[in-house]
């Protein structure tokens, strides 16, 4: 008897990779699950709150988190990291440039009027261009919004997770701790606008965009 194949046989990676984005937490940060349906492994980006909902999404997709990765350490992107780590056992990744924000999470909570939380220390710091070990993802250091801001590039499915560095028609604010306007402009021009024009950009808050669209129409950074 013929064996049925449970996965699409076309070898295009896009058929294997699942990208699911949904807003979480008090400031509706976009949390993303990027998973490989063949291996069952996934990266979890920016668990900014609503741990239960994140875990439910993972269960529905049938994926196991192998790394909890952060675009930066503003509180609205990290609030549920500890809870997710406790349940999944996955290691936490952050760029070292944002460790002062991570360790200062209680101070951030006070500043923004949120109940105070404690977080475990990150398990690993990203290096620039680091292979994320899942879905062909690579970490790009894109400082400016914060010193350790990092974007995640998935060549195989032409998807960029830009955090608060690039928004649809806008860019991240640089007036908070360690922000630097010239640096964010340089990061966007040199690291993001050099990616595929057609790439889908998942932003830190609000709708997705495309690289070509921002190059043509972003009022803050033109190509
Ligand atoms: Zn931010
Ligand atoms: Zn944010």
Image (cartoon, rainbow, N blue to C red):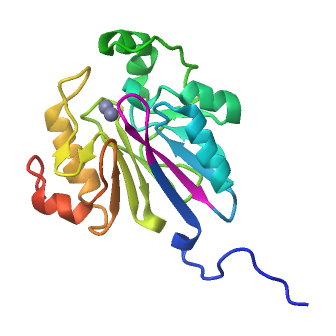
Residue located 53% across and 34% down the image = 93
Residue 101 shows in this picture = yes
- Residue 222 or 28: which is nearer the viewer? 28
Q: Is residue 35 magenta?
A: yes
Q: Where is residue 6 in the image (x, y as percent from the top left)?
A: 74, 74
Q: What residue span does the magenta drawing correspond to?
A: 22-36
Image quarter for ligand 2 equals top left
- The residue sitting at the bottom extreme is 1
Horizontal side, residue 148 vs residue 38: left or right? left
- Name above or below for residue 122 compared with residue 138: above
Residue 66 is a magenta residue: no
Nearest to the observer: residue 207 or residue 161: 207
Residue at the spot 30% in from the left edge and 52% down from the top edge: 207
Name, please, the residue furthest toward the right: 1
Please indicate whether residue 90 sits to the left or right of residue 151 in the image: right
Q: In this view, does 118 lie to the left or right of 204?
A: right
Magenta: main secondary structure: strand
Q: Which residue is drawn at 67% across and 27% down?
A: 86
Q: Is residue 59 above or below residue 200?
A: above
Numbered-mark total? 0
> What residue sits 21% from the left and 65% below the top?
212
């Amino acid at each position: 008897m013929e064996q049925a194949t449970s996965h699409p046989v076309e070898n295009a990676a896009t058929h294997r990779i699942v990208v699911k984005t949904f807003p979480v937490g008090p400031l509706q940060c976009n949390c993303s699950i990027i998973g490989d349906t063949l291996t069952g492994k996934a990266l979890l980006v920016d668990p900014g709150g609503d741990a239960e909902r994140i875990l439910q999404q993972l269960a529905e997709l049938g994926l196991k988190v192998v790394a909890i990765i952060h675009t930066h350490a503003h509180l609205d992107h990290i609030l549920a990291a500890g809870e997710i780590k406790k349940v999944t056992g996955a290691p936490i990744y952050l760029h070292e440039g944002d460790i002062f924000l991570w360790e200062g999470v209680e101070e951030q909570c006070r500043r923004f009027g949120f109940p105070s939380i404690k977080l475990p220390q990150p398990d690993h710091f990203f290096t620039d261009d680091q292979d994320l070990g899942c879905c062909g993802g690579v970490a790009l250091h894109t400082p400016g919004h914060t010193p350790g801001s990092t974007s995640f590039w998935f060549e195989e499915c032409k998807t960029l997770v830009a955090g608060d560095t690039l928004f649809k028609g806008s860019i991240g604010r640089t007036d908070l701790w360690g922000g630097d306007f010239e640096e964010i402009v340089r990061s966007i021009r040199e690291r993001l606008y050099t990616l595929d024009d057609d790439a889908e950009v998942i932003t830190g808050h609000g709708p997705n965009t495309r690289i070509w669209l921002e190059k043509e129409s972003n009022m803050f950074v033109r190509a």
